[in-house]
Amino acid sequence: MSYTFQFGVIAQYQNEILAGIWMTIKLSVASIILGCAAGIVLASVRSMKPGIGRILVDAYVEIIRNTPFLVQLFIVYFGLPGMGFRVSAVTAALIGMTINLAAYSTEIIRAGIESIHKSQIEAGEALGFTKLQIYRHVIIMPAIAKVYPALCSQFVLMMLASSVCSAISTNELAASAAFIESQSYRSFEIYIVVTLIYLALALTLRGVLALAGLWLFGRRVARRTATALPEVTA
Amino acid sequence: MILRTFGFSEFGFLLSALLWTVVLTIIALSGGGVVGFLIALARTSTQKWLRIAAATYIQIIQGIPVLMILFLSYYGLSLAGLQLPPLVAAGASMTIYASGYLAEIWRGCIQSVPKPQWEASESLAMTRAQQYRYVILPQALRISLPSTVGFAVQVVKNTSITSIIGFVELARAGQLINNATFQPFRVFIAVAMLYFVVCYPLSQLSRWLERRLHARSHH
Amino acid sequence: MPEVIIENVHKSFGSVEVLKGVSLTVEPGEVIALIGRSGSGKSTLLRCINGLEKINSGRIEIAGHTVSADPKQLRELRRDVGIVFQSYNLFPHLSVGENIMLAPKIVKNIGKVQTRETAEKVLQLVGLSEKFDAYPDELSGGQQQRVAIARSLAMQPKVMLFDEVTSALDPELTEEVLNVMEQLARDGMTMILVTHEMSFARRVATKTIFMHQGKIWEEGPSKQLFGDPQTPELRQFVKSDVK
Ligand SMILES: Nc1ncnc2c1ncn2[C@@H]1O[C@H](COP(=O)(O)OP(=O)(O)OP(=O)(O)O)[C@@H](O)[C@H]1O
Ligand SMILES: [Mg+2]
């Protein structure tokens, strides 16, 4: 073992790393906002009376949740151009991440909605709320509060999974690592450093989400979020 | 290069690659199962430093991308002077990945066995090992089935990431065929369908187990 | 020689002192009833006796063992001291027979034939011979509690501890469990029981102890204690129970 670690080399690639981090953050934040919004809409459709809407949403959720994110990216990036939609690697990444996260969010929020008791809705009606008010204050917000920790875990998983976008040449953090590796041949060092950056990003994201939970739903939900690890459900 | 179209022989190639996806999944679940089980035990140990070490391991594995685990084991192993086939690097990293998640799933299951079960068995003069072996783990096992099967779906899907270091499983096979046929939409839809065929039944099984568990514990 | 010696035991949870110097001796074959208001420390005392809770100071000896923090010594002690809880705590994944045979088999390394014999004997004692192959969730609460008693008895303990074993049961089911305990007492088992069944304590216990605020407030032969309470606290307690 004559290998000597040289972390110093990496310092000169600071800009590449920062650019990669920035892209990872942008993609994650955008897909979290879009995916979560889509999840709320789809879960609402899902919770209505049985019908074509429910069938379509279920099919979408099942298809996305039972196929790999990487293959979804391939279809978006390599497959869509054949159908006349040419997209950049970054757009493809954003589309792929949003589609993926929307499916998981739908499933998580659906579970939240199902856990809301009928009696609460009736109580809302008794208080003279309009349908929309009931929907917002009695169903959606309490549902999200309930599943907020699971939702956040999914967000963190998505941020980590965004590293896979390097395979379609999206220039996010993992791609920066690959680039620097090809230039410096300091493979192990660069991947150690980038791994630690991901770890820091994950912890930060979890912290930020816990704060958001505190602001949105109060203390109890926030505490559960801070300690919750990514939940793995099928 | 000869351009081919996506036909039977290509589909056959995908099927044989699917076999490697399954092999890798089995390696990940058995290797990760053993390591994850030990870490779950450490996580629920009476020894504080063991608990902290296990919790740290879990936090780290769940806080970094699978892709980075893959690169680190790939380059780490070659640094150690081992020129190993991609299967070994892929198997090793999938094992590490699965262990971090299984440990956490199983910790939850062990801790969801009610505390009085510990007290009752302790009061019958059992050793801690006997308590685990005869009282706690059999109950935890039942509770763990739905989420463990659910996690297996994640593993199947995440084995696709090993294609990035050149291991020829289903996703990589799709890329190879696409390079030869230039029919990306068809090829990757076919690839997705094959993943779906494996994952969907597992997801349904997980759900069924979950329902059964709840039905049992509610009456 | 006494079967149980408790000497000046103190126990705190955090900064709250729950046992404030409890002393007690129990002769072989004696039946001790512990009574007192909720939170007076009855369960805690019982759990200290078999080492489920660690005492802060004092000394406990039982069936020839000293309660210590050493796991090995504690296991020796627990072979000779059975405990039954309010919530039965049967092992739900094992049948009644397996519940009873498990500890003798793995802790005492007693052979299959003999553990089975013992299991059948103790099951008969609690009147549930026909339930050998049933699972806990197929039994009523009273039946489960009797199985829990049988499970303890199968270890052939010298002392039995009972913590409000009938509190979760309906009156009819309470009766069947109390009958088992009375039978045990008649057979000469040394017992310490926490109970809210005053008439049972009065009838079966050789001695009753009234705990109040972490101390033994009053003690004496059961009939005397109930018939002529000395302290206002016990008088109050006995009166409120009659209501
Ligand atoms: N594990 C614990 N941690 C902190 N405090 C405890 C614990 N166990 C018991 N206590 C406290 O110790 C006091 C005595 O509790 P204990 O259970 O011994 O009372 P008890 O006499 O058995 O009451 P009850 O009739 O309600 O069963 C109570 O104030 C209780 O809150
Ligand atoms: Mg009590």
Image (spheres, rainbow, N blue to C red):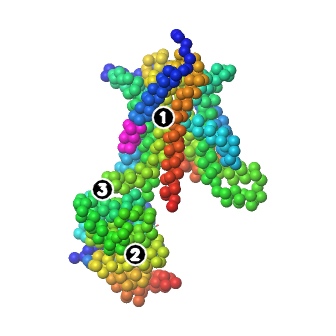
Marks 2 and 3 share the same chain? no
- Which of discs 3 and 1 lies nearer the camera? The answer is 1
Disc 3 is placed on an element classified as loop
Q: Amino acid at mark 1?
A: Val
Q: Chain of mark 2?
A: C
User: Of the numbered discs in the image, which one, if any, rests on residue B156?
Assistant: 1
For residue C155, above or below residue C233: above
- At x 58%, y 27%, the residue is B189
Quarter of image, ligand 1: bottom left
Residue B72, percent from left and from top: 43, 28
Number of marks = 3
- At x 67%, y 59%, the residue is A119
Q: Nearer the viewer, residue B41 or C215?
A: B41
Q: Is residue B31 magenta?
A: yes
Q: Nearer the viewer, residue B33 or C127?
A: C127
Instruction: Count neighbours of disc 2 (C-alpha within 10 A) and say few if under 14, some if 14 to 19, many if 20 or more.
Output: many
Secondary structure mainly formed by the magenta segment: helix
Q: Chain of mark 1?
A: B
Left or right: residue A225 compared with residue B118: right
Cα–Cα span, label 2 and label 3: 29 Å
Left or right: residue B134 compared with residue B207: left
Cα–Cα span, label 1 and label 2: 53 Å
Q: Is residue A226 magenta?
A: no
- Which of discs 2 and 3 lies nearer the camera? The answer is 2
Instruction: Count neighbours of disc 3 (C-alpha within 10 A) and say few if under 14, some if 14 to 19, many if 20 or more.
Output: some
User: Of the numbered discs in the image, which one, if any, rests on residue B127?
Assistant: 3
* Labels 2 and 3 touching (C-beta < 8 A): no
User: Of the numbered discs in the image, which one, if any, rests on residue C177?
Assistant: 2
Disc 1 is placed on an element classified as helix
Residue C235, percent from left and from top: 46, 85
Residue stretch rendered in magenta on the structure: B29-39
Disc 2 is placed on an element classified as helix
